[in-house]
Amino acid sequence: MQLSREALLAAYRQMKIIREFEERLHVEIQTGEIAGFTHLYCGQEAVAVGVCEHLSPADKIVSTHRGHGHCLAKGCDVNDMMKEIWGSREGLCKGKGGSMHIADVTKGMLGANGIVGAGAPIAVGAALASRVDGPGPDGLKIAIAFSGDGACNQGTTFEAMNLAAVTKAPCIFVFENNHYSEHTGVSYAVGTNQDIASRAEAFGMKAWRADGTDFFAVHDTMREVLDYVRAGHGPAAVEFDTERFFGHFEGDPQRYRGPGELDRIRATRDCLTRFRASVKGAGLLSDADLDAVDDDVMAAIEGAVAAARAAARPTPEDVLADVYIAY
Amino acid sequence: MSNMMYRAAVLSTIMEEMERDPNVVVLGEDVVGGMGTEGGPEAIGGIWSTSTGLYDRFGATRVIDTPISESAIVGAAAGLALSGKRPIAELMFADFIGVSLDQIWNQIAKFRYMFGGKTRCPAVIRMAYGAGYNAAAQHSQSVHQILTGMPGLKVVMPTTPADVKGLLRTAIRDDDPVIFLEHKALYATTGEVPDDRDFMIPFGHARLSRAGGDVTIISSGLLLGMCEAVADKLKGEGIGCDVIDLRTTSPLDEETILDSVEVTGRVVVVDEAPPRCGLGADLCALVAEKAFSSLKAPPLQVTPPHTPIPFARELESAYLPSVDKIEAAVRRVLAWR
């Protein structure tokens, strides 16, 4: 652990923001105020934060349908995201995208994506754009493709890994293995003995594996991976073993879970609880420090929900806007 | 002006735009050709000769030879475009959109709308389309029917070398995604092309290739030449045909079509794609809705039948529209009382 007190607090705050953003949506969705399909990221916060904290806005990420955590970690505004999920015309995407299509290109966030497996080729394109620009003082700008254990079975992901390998594109394939692709277990759906990283290795890439519920493991692993890719060695991959605290989508009855499974993973595999224990044990932060962050985050989420409720609704005329720049 | 082939107009426009703008990047299968072989890079230079010499001139970062991975090609174009580049992706055959359709339809076409108008995706997806080479059902299709119906895409199908030049330059400089359809049976045709390196043709402006005033024939691509042949023949009989080359199917130049139909009252749409839910049906509906009072006969479409494209020479000929079929349709709308 070489992180400063400020960096530790920032990482904790970012993970806590994602957690409470999602926990609040889980509650608000029951009221019927939020339209459409929502897929919550709770449980996987250490991955989004441990990856994105190393990135600048010029580094790109492409996300998944479970994208709120990636968006927040890459710098999308909390209020603008909440307004988007509420369908407001003041939302980050003016109410046109919703939960599955949040993007902010100015932050290097090239979009959550409703199509499982669609993101990896797009990330390779962003990495090829970096290759055109060449390295800056800190090495190459990189692109990250977030994929789940579901997307690792799409042919698009294989095409993307191969294209990145043959072009030596500075692309990192981050696989978040939360053990479920929708409602199907990884032991059934991932044919390579449940080992996703080995697929990247089969394309000639260097691959890492780490515990995605341990923020420090994610942080340290990504430091290594990023140094390797920014130096121009070509693409790389990481598989993070993580947990999904909610269902595939909000409303999922989760009948596929084992007895006591949710209680067990919340008790033993919660990245926020583990972070608190680590920093307290090492004497880096106190309960008071972390509780102060918690209070601050709860107020921020409360404010975001209030702002989303009060935000302007779109008008029928808005349907026609922004299909083309000029037509 | 220079006399050049349709395919040379493609290549020279890409070359000029890559020289002008360092953000223009080319990618696709065999766009270099020969990578990883004893023959070496540029051993082929693209099977349509539309990328020959680009790799030697601009190098591997801007001329990206890809594996046979159409989803990755179009997806990479999407990522390049979102990252500030102007990719020109090539699908060797238009039929291969099937492999990459998610990236075209769910990604590139929708980014700007889904992201609230805050992004631009200036990608050009070029592809060779069309029948005439007995290449059968998976290497001969006209795909504008599928792509024109997708909001967010612009769809261009040039007929002449000059239009290739003007429309491809517009496509590359356009900030929206553009599908650029090149008819493979037109690649070797020649024509006069302006030398001006800023020569551009705006989208949504059809070209009146024959003016007559008695009947309106609408087409684009390979079949336009057949429409012109019919018009030239009927002119000898004192029958005047307006022949409209659409140039782009999205956006559509409704004004030129409706202006012509208001004068002629008789319309034939000639299209290389099958008849159901296609361009012909679309344009017949357009004139029925917006020029009904001018019509003197039911609008007709001349298209292939609702079948896949067959292989044998006799079968492909029977399948495709022809000068005779177009002439028969024109005479039918003229004879309507």
Image (spheres, rainbow, N blue to C red):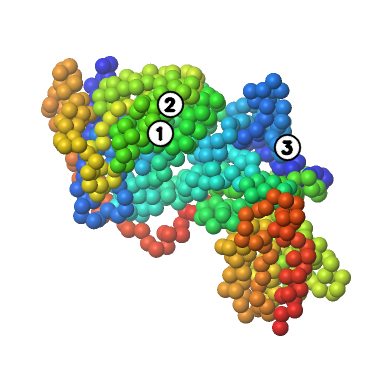
Chain of the residue under label 2: A
Q: Percent x, y for residue A168?
A: 53, 24
Instruction: Name the amino acid, label 2.
Output: Arg
**Discs 1, 2 touching: Cβ within 8 Å:** yes
Mark number, residue B335: none
Instruction: Please report contact status of discs 3 and 1: CB closer than 8 Å, yes or no.
Output: no
Q: CA distance from mark 1 to mark 2?
A: 9 Å
- Same chain for marks 2 and 3? no
- Helix, strand or loop at mark 2: helix
- For the residue labelled by badge 1, is the local secondary structure a helix, a strand or a loop? helix
Q: Is residue A147 visible?
A: yes
User: Residue flagged by tag 1: what amino acid is it?
Assistant: Cys
The amino acid type of the residue labelled 3 equals Ser
> Residue reaching furthest bottom?
B337
Q: Residue sitting at 34 percent across and 22 percent down?
A: A209
Above-or-below relation of B45 to B255 = above
Please identify the residue farthest to the left as the structure is shown.
A288
The disc numbered 1 marks a residue on which chain? A
Q: Quadrant of the C terminus of chain B?
A: bottom right
Left or right of residue A123: residue A263: left
Sooner in the amino-acid sequence: mark 1 or mark 2: 1
Quadrant in which residue B216 is drawn: bottom right
Residue on which disc 3 sits:
B49
Q: Residue at x 68, y 78 (%)?
A: B297
The residue beneath circle 1 is A152
Q: Residue at x 33, y 47 (%)?
A: A99
